[in-house]
Amino acid sequence: MGLSIRIVPCLDVTDGRVVKGVNFTDLVDAGDPVEMANLYNLEGADELTFLDISASSSDRETTLDVVRKTAEQVFIPLTVGGGIRSVADVDRLLRAGADKVSINTSAIARPELIAEIADRFGSQVLVISVDARRARTESGFEVTTHGGRQSAGLDALAWVEKACALGAGEILLNSMDADGTRAGYDIGMITAVRAVSKVPLIASGGAGTLEDFGAALDAGADALLAASVFHFGIHRISDVKKYLTAQGYSIRNNRIA
Amino acid sequence: MIAILDYGSGNLRSAQRAFERSGSEVVVTSDRDTALNAAGLVVPGVGAFAACMRGLVAIGGDEIVRARVAAKRPTLGICVGMQILFRDGDEHANDGLHKGVGIWQESITKLVAPILPHMGWNSVEITGQSTLFDGIADQSFYFVHSYAAKASIGSAQAWTTHGEKFLSAVEDGAICATQFHPEKSGDAGLQLIKNWVGLL
């Protein structure tokens, strides 16, 4: 069968709660991250991503506790992103039970951080998250900060190549043009980044129809991250996996007879 | 009692919880006698081959593993904890190969594949009479690595392909090992752990 593509739901967490509108009717407490992690696991999520959007350090401590509780109950890989600025931050998250960390702004501000984390913990723990949009740069894509509102002054492909050379273990590519539109992933961007990256590529932003997921895989994505389509119940993870299986993609079936 | 060997290789609490699901008492320890006498010893491993080996040697873990193998006491290596049981590895080795524990006289080498690390869920093909994969031979398991063993050893093997075919698990008398992470492989992984515990 070979390596399966991965479906990765992303949960925004602050002060110990999942935020963003969530539309699960069968949950007693829709805002409980551990409960949601359990539910997504049962639905067939291949990994989980927590995005820590905490504003204060006391909130960050609470997020560590969420990571700890989740890792003790849900036995699939867990990535945590948001607010990571140092090797010490990574160490705390890994000790709490995260398997991988995702960094974005801090790597743009200080690219050596990529090498520092990779040297200490290995590349396999490090996801470089790239918020990119179409622009008049050399490749036609640029890196943004502040949720896509500001240019980071970096060509997206040049940045991906640099991040990989410094020790990135995986690239999470978020299309700021497609994000939230549900009009499909930015296929051109995925194709372009795939061509310069030899590490696994996670596509994010724009998932709407089931066909969109297949198109991103055809463009070279190894994994598909989505938030709102799952949270709002537009698609269940199991439906996406059923569809992709029928289309002939290699999908993990986690049902044990 | 199951002992998970703590030699500074990452957070072992979720691994402890996964093994506890089998109904066993599980301790995370670097104590020599506890590790030697446990019914089952788990040797985890995350990061680079040489760094893991250094950590293992620092607590006398290489001697503990050799003593357990000699006494035929069940031992399970996971991920880099599998790799360091081999003779040597060439990960970041500019000045000759890094030495492993040497239970198996083969080498760990880099996978030849277009995309590395090999990250995600992959299937297994079983050869020999496997106990570890009883009831779960058709399942996928979670891998994160760029290096692997390619030789056939032991009485049962699991093989996985990423770019090339490699040894994804081995059962060799009292010593077993998996290149993937059973503690991160969902229900299939928990079942494999239960199967291993059944051997103790």
Image: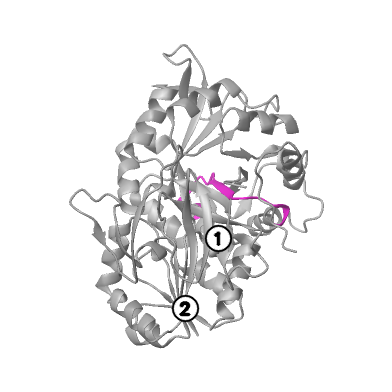
Task: Give SS at disc 1.
Answer: helix
Quadrant assignment, res A169: top left
Q: Amino acid at mark 2?
A: Gly
Residue under the image location 74 percent in, 33 percent down = A210
Q: Is residue A14 visible?
A: no
Residue B44 sits above or below residue B90 on the image = below
Q: Provide the chain ID for the residue under circle 1.
A: B
Quadrant assignment, res B113: top left
Foreground residue among B164 and B184: B164
Tell me if mark 1 has few (under 14), some (14-19) or many (20+) residues whose alpha carbon lies within 10 angstroms of its own.
many
Residue under the image location 35 percent in, 52 percent down = B109
Residue A24 sits above or below residue B45 on the image = above
Q: Residue furthest right?
A: A25
Q: Residue furthest top?
A: A136
Q: Is residue B188 magenta?
A: no
Q: Nearer the viewer, mark 2 or mark 1?
A: 2
Numbered range of the magenta stretch: A42-59
* Mark positioned earlier in the residue sequence (2 or 1): 2
Left or right of A49 in this view: B46: left
Quadrant assignment, res A112: top left
Q: Amino acid at mark 1?
A: Lys
Compute the Cα span from label 2 to label 1: 25 Å
Task: Give SS at disc 2.
Answer: loop
Foreground residue among B71 and A93: B71
Q: In which quadrant will I find the C terminus of chain A?
A: bottom right
Tell me if mark 2 has few (under 14), some (14-19) or many (20+) residues whose alpha carbon lies within 10 angstroms of its own.
some
Q: Which mark is residue B173?
A: 2
Residue A175 screen position, x and y as percent: 56, 27
Residue A88 screen position, x and y as percent: 35, 53
Q: Which mark is residue B184?
A: 1
